[in-house]
Amino acid sequence: MGEYQELIQLTPEGIRSREQPLVMSTLAALGCETAEPCRSLDLDLLEASQVKADPLPLLCLRCRISHALHGWLLATYKVHKALHGIEVEVMASYALDDDGELTIRTGPSETAPFTYAQIASMPAGLISPFSAEVLRSYDSALCGLPHWSRLKIQAHNELKAYFRQHGLLLISDWALLSNSSPTRVRQACAQHVRSRATIEALCALHGRYGLPYEAAKLSYKQATGKASGWQPDLAFLRALAPDQDPFTTSDQLKAIALAIRQLLTIRASKSLDEAAAAGFEAIDPSYLAASEQEQGPSGGELKALIDAALQRAMDQHMPQVLATAGKNAKLLRCLWAGWAEGLTNRPLADRCNTSCGTVSKKLRPSEHASAIATAAAMELKRHPAFASCGQSVEAAERLAGALRNHLLEPEREGDIAPLRRWVQHHLSQS
């Protein structure tokens, strides 16, 4: 029963398992104090959390999630540490950030009971701790909770960005090819492929790949029940390029995938979008406003609207973030000052005499940028130029995502990103 009673978390002393004695009453009420962890018990606890506004059933499940995440982190670290130099505590800072509290942060200084209704009502996007994101997105019809937890952490964009900084993409060659745009493939082939085949031939091969891949993956999933593990067989490769040997086709596809990996990992530190899902280009927030064919504000006017909304949102959110007092005040100021200068985790940890895991846990600039972007997007959608962004959830999320990236990325090389500039100015005035 340890998986329901012990929460694995990242602490200043490292990754530790801590018993949660409060959950015993919940397990006793379900008559399962000694039952083995299983899917049916997961579902009973989930149902109990939905029927009654009680945070304890969810705490049981948060413990269960932490064990699944910890196992995945250790396995991934063991496989890739030697070649890529990744650090398990840095990885854990993205996944094992649950402190076991019975409340959840809903704002810079606001909290609410950690109930299912509360996490389900929070705005779309990554919330903290990560276990809350796992729980509120969980669909029991698809798979068990431990597997869902592993799927969610593999899709964590900030963790993927960390991996890319170390030259690691946790995606199969075949999925990477499917997820990559023609523009990205052409750029990757031009820069990194050394082959007898021309760039045009490789791009044409990639252009024929997508639809057969999706059909083959669907058949594989229906036959095996698995979402991963598919490999192209000789029939697939022959159908893709009938005029050449299937082994040559396989080698060419792998060469394209390797080129995409090299392109993304080499450039990972330059763009948040390249640290997100492969195959998506950067989005300028102003492009999500009124189209050029419509009568509306000019590009300069749109930029002014965006900058003003972001400035107001930063002025509202960030002072409370930076206002921590007590024994952590000096460390927090050191970390934010270094981050504002552009330092990454390792140099920041060295400067402030702390660990990379602490840097990631204390700062979380992307989380704050998301909160600021969401607030700015809500303001902008009230303006006629951005009215179309309020007509669908997808458009609203794209606007908030574009604003977040705008906050964290400089407009031109050599510039300072808006959020870094705000932090620099605030610290210089305080």
Image: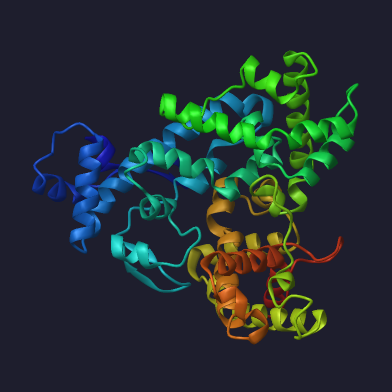
Rendered image quadrant of residue 259: top right
How far across and how far down the image is residue 206, in percent? 75, 34
Q: Is residue 211 left or right of residue 294?
A: left
Q: Work out whether 226 lies above or below 429.
A: above
Question: At x 69% / y 60%, what residue is drawn?
Answer: 339
Residue 18: x and y, percent?
32, 43
Closer-to-camera residue (329/301): 301
| Quarter of the image where the C terminus is located | bottom right
- Describe residue 285's horizontal placement relative to residue 21 as left or right: right
Question: Can the viewer see residue 7 in this picture?
Answer: no
Instruction: Work out which quarter of the rendered image holds the N terminus and state it.
Output: top left
Q: Nearer the viewer, residue 97 or 412?
A: 412
Tell me the residue at 55%/78% (across/down). 378
Residue 285 percent across, percent down from the top left:
70, 70
Q: Quadrant of residue 67?
A: top left
Q: Nearer the viewer, residue 106 or 227?
A: 227
Q: Name the residue nearer the viewer: 296 or 125.
A: 296
In the rendered image, residue 280, in percent from the top left (x then y), is placed at 70, 51
